[in-house]
Image (spheres, rainbow, N blue to C red):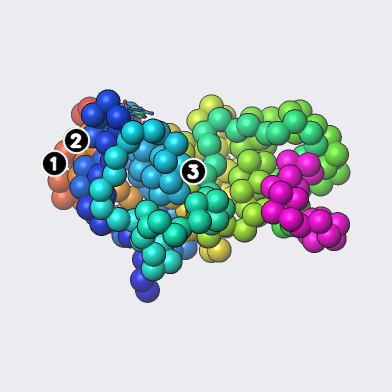
């Protein structure tokens, strides 16, 4: 099967000259959890942001190379960036519900997209909450304020908000930061369910989480792709000394 997203010689340099990504080539298969891990400042968040061109917002930054999604280079002039960001959807580390009810949070983006039919909206609300493994906890209080939810519930609500818009790929930057172990497990469980339908690209909060949730993983160091491979190979028999040193805790 052809990959969902392909990076070919991708480089990204911030306006101050920091080369955050250096000549990265890798394929991201469909319907799996692809983990991008490495020490802080290695370029993980930059890589996620480039994938749906949120990186366009950094004025004066430069990129080279290509990112192919649905047989098209996302950097081409005729790409509709709004549509790209709906199809490759980012869920941020700090969950930020919108003011309003749980239901409002889910229907807002749909209304913006022109969906007004009440039944369609209700169906999307239910389906996205179920997919994010939040439905059972909130089904009796959809009109309650989203701010009353716990941290783990807010994180799953933000995930559901992305899912309501029916993306193809979900980008998760450290989605369980600040969550207790039980909430972390619930978010991880929802990801296992979601990969059947979506492609998930995730920056984990730890090497342990990377080794737990990944199908394939890529190790970044200082903007370079050191190693990419299946979880069983990369975490058990790394090919590169720097990968081994990092996963055995010798640095980072
Ligand atoms: P990670 O997510 O792995 O911690 P980042 O992608 O955030 O790494 O950062 C990679 C490098 O790019 C770092 O040197 C960081 O300082 C730099 N960087 C990140 N964001 C910006 C920005 N908006 N402007 C300038 N430099 C940035
Ligand atoms: Mg980061």
Q: Which of 174 and 59 is in front in this view?
A: 59
Mark linked to residue 172:
3
Residues at circles 2 and 1 in contact by the CB criterion of under 8 Å: yes
Residue 51 in percent (x, y) is at: 41, 49
Q: Name the element at disc 1.
A: helix
Name the residue: 65% across, 47% down: 160
Q: Residue furthest front?
A: 77
Q: Is residue 213 visible?
A: no
Name the residue: 69% across, 54% down: 113
What is the magenta segment's predominant secondary structure?
helix
Mark 2 and mark 3: Cα distance apart in space: 25 Å
Eye-nearest disc, 3 or 1: 3
Q: Label 1 neighbourhood size at 10 Å, few (<14), some (14-19), many (20+)?
A: few
Q: Label 3 neighbourhood size at 10 Å, few (<14), some (14-19), many (20+)?
A: many
Q: Taking 21 as reference, is 59 left or right?
A: right
Q: Name the element at disc 2.
A: helix
Task: Say whether residue 112 is magenta.
Answer: yes
> Is 207 situated above or below 73?
above
Residue 85 in percent (x, y) is at: 52, 50
Q: Taking 65 as reference, is 172 left or right?
A: right
Name the residue: 47% across, 63% down: 31
Q: Name the element at disc 3.
A: strand
Mark 3 and mark 1: Cα distance apart in space: 28 Å
Q: Which of 194 and 74 is in front in this view?
A: 74
Q: Report the residue marked by disc 1.
A: 241
Of the image marks 2 and 3, the number of the one nearer the N terminus: 3
In the rendered image, which quarter contains the C terminus?
top left
Say how many tags the image has. Answer: 3
In the rendered image, which quarter contains the N terminus?
bottom left
For the magenta stretch, what is the residue range? 103-123
Task: Say whether residue 70 is magenta.
Answer: no
Eye-nearest disc, 2 or 3: 3
């Amino acid at each position: 099967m052809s990959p969902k997203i392909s990076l070919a010689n991708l480089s990204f340099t911030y306006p101050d000259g920091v080369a955050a990504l250096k000549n990265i080539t890798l394929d991201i298969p469909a319907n799996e959890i692809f983990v991008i891990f490495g020490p802080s400042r290695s370029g993980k968040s930059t890589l996620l942001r480039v994938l749906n061109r949120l990186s366009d917002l950094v004025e004066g930054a430069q990129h080279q190379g290509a990112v192919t999604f649905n047989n098209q280079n996302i950097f081409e002039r005729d790409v509709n960036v709004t549509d790209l960001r709906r199809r490759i959807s980012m869920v941020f580390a700090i969950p930020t519900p919108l003011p309003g009810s749980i239901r409002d949070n889910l229907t807002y983006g749909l209304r913006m997209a022109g969906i007004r039919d009440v039944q369609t909206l209700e169906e999307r609300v239910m389906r996205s909450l179920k997919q994010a493994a939040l439905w059972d906890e909130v089904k009796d209080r959809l009109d309650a304020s989203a701010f009353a939810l716990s941290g783990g519930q807010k994180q799953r609500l933000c995930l559901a908000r992305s899912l309501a818009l029916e993306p193809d790929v979900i980008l998760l930057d450290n989605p369980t930061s600040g969550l207790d172990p039980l909430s972390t497990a619930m978010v991880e469980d929802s990801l296992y369910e979601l990969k059947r339908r979506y492609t998930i690209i995730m920056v984990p909060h730890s090497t342990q989480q990377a080794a737990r949730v990944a199908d394939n993983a890529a190790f970044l160091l200082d903007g370079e792709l050191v190693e990419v491979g299946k979880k069983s190979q990369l975490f058990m028999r790394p090919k590169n000394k720097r990968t081994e040193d990092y996963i055995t805790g010798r640095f980072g």
